[in-house]
Every structure is written in C-alpha cells, then in structure tokens.
Image (cartoon, rainbow, N blue to C red):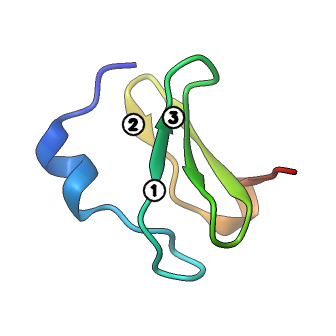
Amino acid sequence: MNLDPALLEILVCPQCRATLAVDQAASELVCNACALAYPVRNDIPVMLVDEARAIG
C-alpha cells in the first residue's frame, strides 16, 4: 500500500470525522473511534461507510 502522506493527513472517517490509522498488513485505514476499517484498493482509499468492515 503506497499512500501519499499529505493525503493521510487530511483523510478522516466519513462517519465520525475521527483520524485514521494505517494498517499496512490488511491494506486498510482504521477508525478506532467507531471501529470501522476502510479498504484501500490499488492504492486508493475507499471511504464509503457501506464498504467499511466492522472491527473488534
């Protein structure tokens, strides 16, 4: 997964607006506030709540 650091600074969870953590192993952006993981496909973050996976 190769994401621009500047992009990561401005991306927030679309559901709760919390900051996101990068999970390189799973190719996901994780919101710990609402326990959702957003997939990253072909180095493009899919920031749709319907596409997110519930964690924990």
Q: In the figure, 49 relative to 27: above or below?
A: below
Q: In the figure, 30 relative to 35: above or below?
A: above
Q: Secondary structure at mark 1?
A: loop
Q: In the figure, 43 relative to 18: above or below?
A: above
Q: Residue at x 44, y 22 (%)?
A: 42
Q: Residue at x 51, y 74 (%)?
A: 14
Q: Position of residue 22 (x, y in %)?
A: 46, 38
The circle on residue 55 is none
Q: Earlier in the sequence, mark 1 or mark 3?
A: 1
Pick the front one: 42 or 33: 33
Locate residue 55 relative to residue 46 in the image: left or right. Answer: right
Q: Secondary structure at mark 2?
A: strand
User: Could you tell me the amino acid type at mark 3?
Assistant: Val
User: Could you tell me the amino acid type at mark 1?
Assistant: Leu
Q: Residue at x 74, y 62 (%)?
A: 35
Instruction: Find disc 1 in the rendering and name its residue.
Output: 20
- The image quarter containing residue 16 is bottom right
Q: Secondary structure at mark 3?
A: strand
Instruction: Find disc 2 in the rendering and name its residue.
Output: 44
Asked if labels 3 and 2 touch by Cβ distance under 8 angstroms, the answer is: yes
- The image quarter containing residue 4 is top left
What's the distance in space between the residues labelled 1 and 2, CA to CA?
15 Å
Asked if labels 2 and 1 touch by Cβ distance under 8 angstroms, the answer is: no
Instruction: Find disc 3 in the rendering and name its residue.
Output: 40
